Structure formats: structure tokens, C-alpha cells
Image (cartoon, rainbow, N blue to C red):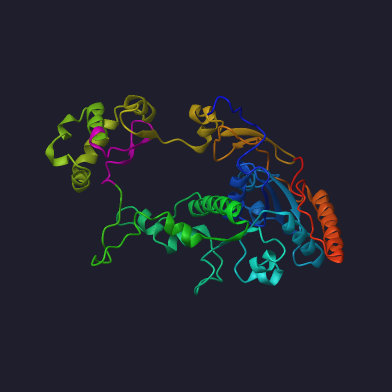
Amino acid sequence: MNQNSAPDCTAGPLTGVRVLDLGAYIAGPYGCALLADQGAEVLKVEPPGGDTLRKYPSTLDAESRAFLGVNRSKRGVVLDLKHAEDRERLLALVRQADVLVHNFRPAVPPRLGIAYEQLRASNPRLIYCAVTGYGEDGPLRGRAGYDQVLQTMTGMCAMQARRGGPPEIICGSVVDYYAAALVAGGVSSALYEREKSGQGQYVGVSLLRSALAMQSARMVWVEGEPRDVGREMRSGGVTGIHPTRDGAIYISANTPHFWQALCARTGLQELLCERYDTVRKRAQHHAEIVPRLHAALVARTALEWEAVFGEEVPCAAARSVEDMFDFPQVLAGDMVQKFQHPAAGTYRGFARGWKFGRTPGPPPFAAPVLDQHGDAVRAEADRLCQRGNACQNTGKPSPHDGAGTLRGAQ
């Protein structure tokens, strides 16, 4: 950090950017949360029944745990886009916004009057991000897309299967969260380009594209190779999760240095021979190596081995997500903070996805209860509608109010 430049703890890289989040579930909404992490002012627009994620199973009575985690640092309003009055309110907000994100199927926005071409006419600077299941074109464009459907379709589940076993789902909505990162990255890039051109643009993110992007290392098919060419990247069982006297530990030993350190720390120096001296050889002979490694690992617990290996062998004892709330490295990075929620009360949660030295941005705040800021936002939207009508009557352009609808306290 430049010592002559003091950090502004209220500003983030995207401070002043106004985002309308019309998404549901994870990919679109969490992409908007990542924009909020960078200082953008995000308004979550929900239908009368609320985001479906609010209804997901949860041990919390007041709110879905998933909704709280995905929708931090947003204000909230309910607008029924099937009704003309609320649709006009949204269009008024669009004229003041920099970004709009939704995850409707491609046929829905034109019916609601919020397709990109329709909104661009009133706000040429709008960055319009559509999150779809399969993309804007093609035979599957109209299908609803879901994380685990795309995992299964694109080979992720087949690759995840244990040797000879059935396909297995990867828990944790990994495709959704990766798509959310693509939303944040694509929107940020489009905002940067707008600074040069002065024009907004359409940004398309799909779960299909996300699932394939996550497999870029496997998505290589050299001309002449057979269909069943090996695409597995696992290191023959040596690198992986192994049992110990108590608990399990993940060990990575792909490089010569780490392999040598693993053998030295476990007392398996006899494995340091030409037969096992490369990753490919160890993969070829994993059935000889792994049983001996397991026999050595039962001497200590997973946490003890983690200490023994230290920095010499990349490893991690298998922990639960609950352990992360008080994990020293997590606390050192301010990755978990306290939130105050009107219904759920005080809770700890993940804070933000980035760390910026000079413009860290304002502290995150809790996801909104349904329509928490609705009265204020609708009133402001109505004022903008009246102002827009007055400007149309006089032929003067509607001003871009720098203190617009998305600003305000939590």
C-alpha cells in the first residue's frame, strides 16, 4: 500500500455503482453480493412470495440459512412485475441504475417488458446481466437450469465417481457459486469498458458455461484421440484423503520435494526409489503405495500429522464448516463477521470475497427480510416516475440523480 494514501474505509472499488438484483436462488443473487462486497449499492427486488431460497429447508425459524448467506449487504423491496404499477416503478429504478441482474428464462423478460433491448432504450449505459441455465440460444435455451442438473449433464458427476462406482453429486452448489463469480467478474469488466465507450452492454452467464469452465483442464480433446481418453487428474491415490488414528487428512505430494518430505516424515524412505520417482509412476503403482502409507498414518491423529507435516507437505486435517468460524487463519483475514438481522438476531457469517488495501469498502450487513425497505424504495420510485413524466412533457432528459433510490441506511 502507498503509505501516502490512507485507506478509505467507507469506499470500495465499486462505490457509486447501483445494482438491481432480480435474481433468485444462488448464482445471480450471490454474484450481486460479490458486487456489494466491492462497494456497490445493491437493491434486491423480489416477487410477492419472495425469493424461493427463503423457503429452503433450514434449522432457523426466522429465515433460511442459505438466503442469509447469499444475500448479504443488500436492501430489499417487493415488486410484482405482473402489475403495471410495480413494473413502472422498476423501469424508473432502471433509469437510475448501472447494473441489472436476473435469472429468468430467456422467454420471460420480453413478456415483462424488461428484455435488454427494451431497457437499453431508456438507459443506454445499463449493464444487463442475464443468468440462464443453458444460454441465450440453442435447443435447450428455454429449460430451467439447476446446479446438480448441470453437474450431471456435463460429466462432473461421472468424474467425481469413485473408481468403478456410480456418478456422484458434488455437494455445495459449486456450479452456482462459480457462475456467481462469473457474474461479478463479467459485470465488473463491462463497467470498466463502459468508462471507455460510455455504453452499457449485455452480459450472458449460464450454468452450462460455468460447469464447462470449471472443467477447462479436462475440456481438451486432441485430434485423433479416442473418446475414452483418460481425463482424470487425480494423482493415483497418493494425493487424496487418507484415514489416520483419529480423523482423516488430505495430502498432496505431486512434486519431488513434497514426495520426499512425505516419505521422510512418515518413515517410508524405502519408497524413495526409481520405481516411484514421478507422479505418473506413483499413479501407476498406487496399489503398492497407498496401503503402506495408511499403515504409517495410523500412528497419529489427523491434527498431529498436520503439525508434523507443517509446511513441508501440503495437507489439511478434515474439518467441519463449523470449525471455520473460529479458525485462526480465517479470523486473521476478517473473513467472518457478526451480523444483526431483524428476525434471525445476531449471527456470524462470511463477510466478503475480496480484500482491497486502499478502498476496503463499508462493512457488510445482513440480508434483508422480505420487503424490509419496500416503503422507502416504492416512494422513491414513484417520485422518479413523476419526474420522468414531467421530463417527457417538457422534452428535457430525466436527470441521473447521484443520490438515487439504491442509497440509504440498512
The one of 342 and 180 positioned closer to us in this rendering = 180
At x 49%, y 58%, the residue is 148
On-image quarter of the C terminus: top right
Residue at the location (59% across, 28% down)? Answer: 5
On the image, the x and y values in percent for residue 372 come to 77, 47
Q: Nearer the viewer, residue 254 or 353?
A: 353
Q: Is residue 139 above or below residue 29?
A: below
Residue 229 position in % (x across, y down) = 26, 61
- Residue 167 seen anywhere in this rendered image of the structure: no
The outermost residue toward the bottom is 139
Q: Is residue 220 above or below residue 313?
A: below
Query: Does the magenta segment cover residue 242?
Result: yes
**What segment is highlighted magenta in the picture?**
235-257
Q: Which quarter of the picture shows residue 227?
A: bottom left
Q: Is residue 44 visible?
A: yes
Q: Nearer the viewer, residue 247 or 399?
A: 399
User: Left or right: where does residue 361 sit relative to residue 302?
Assistant: right
Q: Position of residue 131 (x, y in %)?
A: 57, 60
Left or right: 179 as drawn, with respect to 53? left
Q: Residue at x 27, y 33 (%)?
A: 258
